[in-house]
Image (cartoon, grey):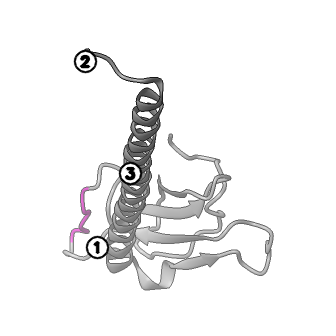
Amino acid sequence: MMGRRGFTMIEMVIYFGLSVMVLGVVMAVFFTGRSNFEATSSSYLVSQDAEAALRWLKTDLQEAALSSIRVYPNPDSPSSPPGLSMAMARNLEGEFQFSKWGGPLWSTYVYYTLDNEGKLVRWMEEHDFNGVPSASTKAPESTEGRKA
């Protein structure tokens, strides 16, 4: 009897079919893991952005003159995007300013608003308050006087 050295056609088809099934399972596991990783990464990045925005907002509200806080949209322009403005005693470089009597020297407006893509935008504008902080008359979405 002759010794068998090769595979029959049926064995080849069975091995090929099993290989394709194993490869399909491995690919499915890989792509599922990859999509889960991307979803988790995106969620983490959004969470980090939200935490950073809340930290800025919390700090600004703690340091703001309460009488100067103004929330938008106001009744005069209900179509404007939501926003917030407040007087701060920090200059554009972020340094806290004091008057000669040791009290806060209100020198800047801080604005928060949403841009066209829904992202939170924070910007600052110097203002001469003459020692008395007041609410801004400028809407936060205004680009007049805004520094990029």
Residue 66, given in percent of the width and then of the height, sits at 44, 84
Residue 43, given in percent of the width and then of the height, sits at 41, 62
Q: Quadrant of residue 77?
A: bottom right
Which secondary structure, mark 1? loop
Which secondary structure, mark 2? loop
Q: CA distance from mark 1 to mark 3?
A: 60 Å
Residue 92 falls inside the magenta stretch: no
19 or 96, nearer to the observer: 19
Q: Residue at x 25, y 18 (%)?
A: 1
Q: Most extreme residue toward the front, as rendered?
A: 1
From the image, tell me which residue sits under label 1: 104
From the image, tell me which residue sits under label 2: 1
Main secondary-structure element of the magenta-colored stretch: loop
Instruction: Please identify, in this view, whether the residue under mark 3 or under mark 2 is nearer the observer.
Output: 2
From the image, tell me which residue sits under label 3: 29
Query: In the image, what residue type sits under mark 3?
Result: Val
Q: Is 80 positioned to the left or the right of 52 in the image?
A: right
Which secondary structure, mark 3? helix
Q: Quadrant of residue 119?
A: bottom right
Q: Would you place residue 103 above or below residue 122 in this image?
A: below
Mark closest to the chain's N terminus, 1 or 3: 3
Q: Magenta segment, which residues?
A: 95-100
86 or 130, nearer to the observer: 86
Residue 49, given in percent of the width and then of the height, sits at 39, 59
User: Badges 2 and 1: C-beta atoms under 8 Å apart?
Assistant: no
